[in-house]
Amino acid sequence: MIQERTFASSSLLEPTATGLVSIFIGDGKGKTTAAIGTVIRAVGHGLRVFVVFFMKGRDYVHGEFAVLDKLPNVTMTSFGQKGWIVKDDVKPEHKKQAALALTSAREAMLNGNYDLVVLDEVNIAIASKLVELDEVLRLIDIKPQNVELILTGRNADHKLIQKADLVTEMLMIKHPYTKGIKARKGIDY
């Protein structure tokens, strides 16, 4: 017989007194997944969350968009163009969208309305020259003490890694893509 269990919180946590900077990097799968897992944990404790997607325009079909839209205390915004950015073919509109994403993240981080701010794929935006590394470093420098900040994406610059309090690398040991298995809806996006 399955025993049902109800989890009730006696009280929600107070917003964190010391917000850290975490970066999820690497060639392996799971960077955004780790960030979204942290979002779910934060919301479960009553924290207020802002998520900005740098490289995933609203026309993408990603499962995280659908679920985050339904969670209380989560505000989400998305920037980017359809398709993947090719490093040698960055268009002005790509840079414009990335600048809007960074402005959105900065405003959310500074306005006092959020305890956790996630910048999904910001490392790719930096590596692709959509936003300047120095702008993101300044963002970290002006982060209020109580705000938790998460940055995701491959190719994180070593200066970001040095500034972060926590860096987790998703290492690809094996990936189904090498067998010709494409990204699967509901599992990979």
Image: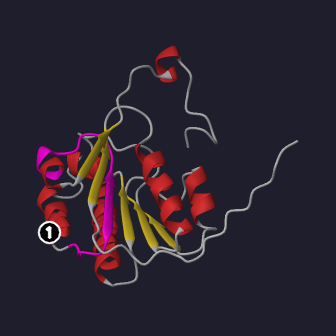
Q: Is residue 91 visible?
A: no
Residue 83 within the magenta-colored segment of the rendering: no
How would you rate the neighbour count of disc 1 (Cα within 10 Å): few for under 14, some for 14-19, many for 20 or more?
Answer: few
Q: Please say if 172 is above or below 144.
A: above
Residue in front for this viewpoint, 125 or 87: 125
Q: Position of residue 59 (x, y in %)?
A: 55, 56
Left or right: 72 as drawn, with respect to 79: right
Q: Which residues are magenta?
A: 143-160
Which quadrant of the figure has residue 84? top left
Q: Position of residue 86 (x, y in %)?
A: 31, 40
Q: Position of residue 135 (x, y in %)?
A: 16, 64
What amino acid is at disc 1? Asp
> Where the C terminus falls, by quadrant?
top right
> Where the N terminus falls, by quadrant?
top right
Colouring of the image: secondary structure
Left or right: 152 as drawn, with respect to 186: left
Left or right: 71 as drawn, with respect to 118: right
Q: Residue at x 27, y 70 (%)?
A: 18
Outermost residue, right side: 1
Q: Residue at x 29, y 47 (%)?
A: 124
Disc 1 is placed on an element classified as helix
Q: Residue at x 11, y 60 (%)?
A: 134
Q: Is residue 179 visible?
A: yes
